[in-house]
Image (cartoon, grey):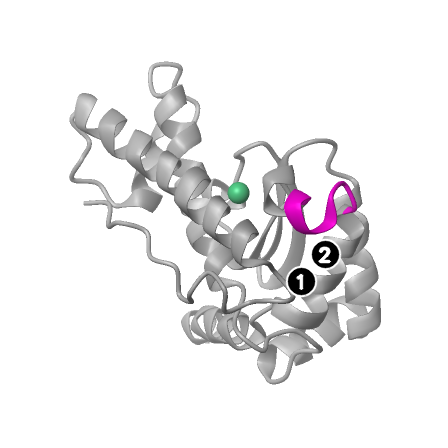
Amino acid sequence: MIPLPVLPFAPGDLEPAMSRDTLSFHFSRHHIDHYERTLALARHFGLADRALEDLVRESRGSRRLAALHRHAAEACNHDCFWRSMRIGGGGPPRGAIAVAIDERFGDYRRFVRRFTGAAASVFGNGWLWLTWYGGRLRIVATRGCETPLVRGHTILLALDLWEHAYYLDHQNRRAAYIRVFLEELVDWEAADAMLGGCLAVAA
Ligand SMILES: [Fe+2]
Protein backbone atom coordinates (compact mmCIF):
# COMPACT_ATOMS: atom_id res chain seq x y z
CA MET A 1 0.00 0.00 0.00
CA ILE A 2 1.08 3.55 -0.64
CA PRO A 3 0.79 5.65 2.50
CA LEU A 4 -0.54 9.19 2.36
CA PRO A 5 2.49 11.53 2.12
CA VAL A 6 3.32 13.41 5.29
CA LEU A 7 5.42 16.56 5.58
CA PRO A 8 7.98 16.15 8.38
CA PHE A 9 7.45 19.82 9.36
CA ALA A 10 4.70 22.43 9.22
CA PRO A 11 4.58 24.57 6.03
CA GLY A 12 5.87 27.68 7.82
CA ASP A 13 8.63 25.91 9.75
CA LEU A 14 11.36 26.43 7.14
CA GLU A 15 10.86 30.19 6.81
CA PRO A 16 12.61 32.35 5.84
CA ALA A 17 14.77 29.86 3.91
CA MET A 18 11.69 28.39 2.22
CA SER A 19 8.41 30.28 2.37
CA ARG A 20 5.16 28.86 3.71
CA ASP A 21 3.53 29.45 0.31
CA THR A 22 6.24 27.58 -1.58
CA LEU A 23 6.10 24.64 0.78
CA SER A 24 2.33 24.39 1.07
CA PHE A 25 1.69 24.77 -2.69
CA HIS A 26 4.47 22.33 -3.48
CA PHE A 27 3.20 19.70 -1.04
CA SER A 28 -0.57 20.08 -1.36
CA ARG A 29 -0.79 20.72 -5.10
CA HIS A 30 2.17 18.92 -6.68
CA HIS A 31 3.11 16.10 -4.33
CA ILE A 32 -0.44 15.15 -3.33
CA ASP A 33 -1.51 15.26 -6.99
CA HIS A 34 1.24 12.75 -7.90
CA TYR A 35 0.23 10.59 -4.94
CA GLU A 36 -3.47 10.56 -5.89
CA ARG A 37 -2.76 9.81 -9.55
CA THR A 38 -0.33 7.04 -8.53
CA LEU A 39 -2.97 5.50 -6.29
CA ALA A 40 -5.66 5.66 -8.99
CA LEU A 41 -3.38 4.18 -11.67
CA ALA A 42 -2.03 1.49 -9.33
CA ARG A 43 -5.60 0.43 -8.55
CA HIS A 44 -6.47 0.47 -12.26
CA PHE A 45 -3.58 -1.88 -13.05
CA GLY A 46 -4.12 -4.11 -10.00
CA LEU A 47 -0.87 -2.98 -8.38
CA ALA A 48 -2.27 -1.18 -5.32
CA ASP A 49 -0.65 -3.66 -2.93
CA ARG A 50 2.87 -2.60 -3.97
CA ALA A 51 5.16 -0.33 -1.97
CA LEU A 52 5.82 2.99 -3.70
CA GLU A 53 9.49 2.26 -4.46
CA ASP A 54 8.56 -1.14 -5.91
CA LEU A 55 5.98 0.51 -8.16
CA VAL A 56 8.64 2.91 -9.44
CA ARG A 57 11.02 0.04 -10.21
CA GLU A 58 8.41 -2.30 -11.71
CA SER A 59 6.85 0.31 -14.01
CA ARG A 60 10.18 1.51 -15.42
CA GLY A 61 10.47 1.06 -19.17
CA SER A 62 6.87 -0.13 -19.61
CA ARG A 63 4.84 1.77 -22.20
CA ARG A 64 1.63 0.47 -20.64
CA LEU A 65 2.66 1.76 -17.22
CA ALA A 66 4.40 4.96 -18.36
CA ALA A 67 1.96 7.35 -16.67
CA LEU A 68 2.03 5.28 -13.48
CA HIS A 69 5.83 5.37 -13.55
CA ARG A 70 5.96 9.15 -13.92
CA HIS A 71 3.57 9.82 -11.03
CA ALA A 72 4.98 7.11 -8.75
CA ALA A 73 8.54 8.36 -9.34
CA GLU A 74 7.52 11.94 -8.60
CA ALA A 75 5.64 10.88 -5.44
CA CYS A 76 8.72 8.96 -4.31
CA ASN A 77 11.11 11.79 -5.28
CA HIS A 78 9.14 14.30 -3.22
CA ASP A 79 9.18 11.97 -0.18
CA CYS A 80 12.99 11.99 -0.49
CA PHE A 81 13.08 15.77 -0.91
CA TRP A 82 11.16 16.52 2.31
CA ARG A 83 13.43 14.10 4.20
CA SER A 84 16.46 16.01 2.89
CA MET A 85 15.60 19.20 4.80
CA ARG A 86 15.06 20.12 8.44
CA ILE A 87 14.37 23.11 10.64
CA GLY A 88 17.71 24.79 11.35
CA GLY A 89 19.50 22.68 8.75
CA GLY A 90 22.31 23.61 6.42
CA GLY A 91 26.03 24.16 6.73
CA PRO A 92 28.85 21.63 6.48
CA PRO A 93 28.12 18.01 7.46
CA ARG A 94 29.57 16.08 10.41
CA GLY A 95 30.16 12.40 11.00
CA ALA A 96 30.66 9.65 8.44
CA ILE A 97 29.05 11.67 5.64
CA ALA A 98 31.63 14.45 6.19
CA VAL A 99 34.47 11.91 5.99
CA ALA A 100 32.98 10.36 2.85
CA ILE A 101 32.62 13.80 1.21
CA ASP A 102 36.23 14.69 1.99
CA GLU A 103 37.43 11.35 0.59
CA ARG A 104 35.37 11.60 -2.59
CA PHE A 105 35.50 15.32 -3.41
CA GLY A 106 38.56 16.62 -1.54
CA ASP A 107 36.68 18.85 0.89
CA TYR A 108 33.21 20.31 1.49
CA ARG A 109 33.92 23.45 -0.54
CA ARG A 110 34.74 21.34 -3.59
CA PHE A 111 31.63 19.24 -3.00
CA VAL A 112 29.50 22.41 -3.01
CA ARG A 113 31.06 23.46 -6.32
CA ARG A 114 30.39 20.06 -7.90
CA PHE A 115 26.84 19.86 -6.52
CA THR A 116 25.97 23.36 -7.69
CA GLY A 117 27.59 22.79 -11.09
CA ALA A 118 25.64 19.56 -11.58
CA ALA A 119 22.38 21.39 -10.84
CA ALA A 120 23.20 23.99 -13.46
CA SER A 121 23.67 21.20 -16.01
CA VAL A 122 19.99 20.17 -15.82
CA PHE A 123 18.14 22.01 -18.58
CA GLY A 124 14.50 22.41 -17.56
CA ASN A 125 12.86 20.26 -14.91
CA GLY A 126 14.72 17.60 -13.01
CA TRP A 127 16.34 16.48 -9.79
CA LEU A 128 19.74 16.55 -8.15
CA TRP A 129 20.82 13.69 -5.92
CA LEU A 130 23.57 12.67 -3.57
CA THR A 131 23.63 8.89 -3.62
CA TRP A 132 25.68 5.93 -2.50
CA TYR A 133 26.43 3.47 -5.29
CA GLY A 134 29.26 1.06 -5.94
CA GLY A 135 30.91 1.84 -2.62
CA ARG A 136 31.18 5.60 -3.10
CA LEU A 137 29.26 8.85 -3.07
CA ARG A 138 27.81 10.09 -6.35
CA ILE A 139 26.31 13.39 -7.40
CA VAL A 140 23.62 12.53 -9.94
CA ALA A 141 21.54 14.94 -12.02
CA THR A 142 18.40 13.59 -13.67
CA ARG A 143 15.74 15.02 -16.00
CA GLY A 144 11.99 15.09 -15.50
CA CYS A 145 10.85 12.42 -13.04
CA GLU A 146 13.92 10.19 -13.43
CA THR A 147 15.43 8.77 -10.27
CA PRO A 148 18.70 6.88 -9.70
CA LEU A 149 16.73 4.61 -7.36
CA VAL A 150 15.83 2.42 -10.35
CA ARG A 151 19.55 1.92 -11.09
CA GLY A 152 20.23 0.61 -7.59
CA HIS A 153 21.47 3.81 -5.96
CA THR A 154 20.71 4.52 -2.31
CA ILE A 155 19.44 8.08 -2.07
CA LEU A 156 21.09 10.18 0.63
CA LEU A 157 19.80 13.60 -0.49
CA ALA A 158 17.27 14.77 -3.07
CA LEU A 159 16.89 18.31 -4.36
CA ASP A 160 13.88 19.21 -6.49
CA LEU A 161 14.98 21.29 -9.51
CA TRP A 162 11.49 21.77 -10.96
CA GLU A 163 10.74 25.46 -11.15
CA HIS A 164 7.70 25.08 -8.87
CA ALA A 165 10.16 24.26 -6.05
CA TYR A 166 11.68 27.74 -6.03
CA TYR A 167 9.91 30.18 -8.33
CA LEU A 168 7.82 31.94 -5.65
CA ASP A 169 10.91 32.53 -3.49
CA HIS A 170 13.70 32.98 -6.04
CA GLN A 171 11.92 33.43 -9.40
CA ASN A 172 14.26 31.91 -12.01
CA ARG A 173 17.41 32.08 -9.85
CA ARG A 174 18.06 28.36 -9.39
CA ALA A 175 21.58 29.00 -8.05
CA ALA A 176 20.16 31.11 -5.18
CA TYR A 177 17.74 28.30 -4.30
CA ILE A 178 20.56 25.74 -4.21
CA ARG A 179 22.71 28.03 -2.06
CA VAL A 180 19.88 28.43 0.48
CA PHE A 181 19.26 24.67 0.43
CA LEU A 182 22.90 23.98 1.30
CA GLU A 183 23.35 26.82 3.79
CA GLU A 184 20.00 26.75 5.65
CA LEU A 185 17.96 23.64 4.88
CA VAL A 186 19.88 20.46 4.12
CA ASP A 187 19.56 17.71 6.72
CA TRP A 188 23.02 16.17 6.87
CA GLU A 189 22.05 14.06 9.89
CA ALA A 190 19.44 12.25 7.78
CA ALA A 191 21.98 11.73 4.99
CA ASP A 192 24.51 10.49 7.55
CA ALA A 193 21.98 7.99 8.93
CA MET A 194 21.24 6.68 5.42
CA LEU A 195 24.96 6.36 4.70
CA GLY A 196 25.43 4.56 8.04
CA GLY A 197 22.93 1.94 6.86
CA CYS A 198 24.87 1.47 3.60
CA LEU A 199 28.21 1.14 5.39
CA ALA A 200 26.75 -1.36 7.90
CA VAL A 201 25.50 -3.55 5.03
CA ALA A 202 28.89 -3.33 3.31
CA ALA A 203 30.87 -4.21 6.48
FE1 LIG B 1 8.35 19.25 -6.89
Which amino acid lies under the numbered mark 2 shown in the image of this protein? Ile
Residue 57 appears in the figure: no
Q: Against 22, is 136 above or below?
A: below
* Percent x, y of residue 88: 58, 78
Q: Secondary structure at mark 2?
A: helix
Q: Can you name the residue that lies furthest to the bottom here?
A: 95
Q: Residue at x 47, y 75 (%)?
A: 193
Instruction: Determine which residue is flagged by label 2.
Output: 178
Q: Against 85, is 169 above or below?
A: above
Was residue 66 drawn as part of the magenta stretch in this picture?
no
Image-based side of 60 in relation to 2, left or right: right
Checking the image for residue 65, the label placed there is none
Checking the image for residue 181, the label placed there is 1
Quadrant of the snapshot with the N terminus: top left
Which amino acid lies under the numbered mark 1 shown in the image of this protein? Phe
* Percent x, y of residue 187: 56, 71
Q: How many numbered marks appear? A: 2
Q: Secondary structure at mark 1?
A: helix
Ligand 1 within 8 angstroms of badge 2 C-beta: no
Ligand 1 within 8 angstroms of badge 1 C-beta: no
Q: How far apart are the two marked residues, 1 and 2, measured between alpha carbons?
A: 5 Å
Find the magenta span and give its range: 167-173
Image-based side of 106 in relation to 181, left or right: right
Front residue (pair 61, 157): 157
Front residue (pair 29, 92): 29
Residue 99 appears in the figure: yes
Q: Are marks 1 and 2 in contact (CB under 8 Å)?
A: yes
Q: Residue at x 64, y 34 (%)?
A: 125
* Percent x, y of residue 129: 61, 52
Q: Residue at x 50, y 69 (%)?
A: 13
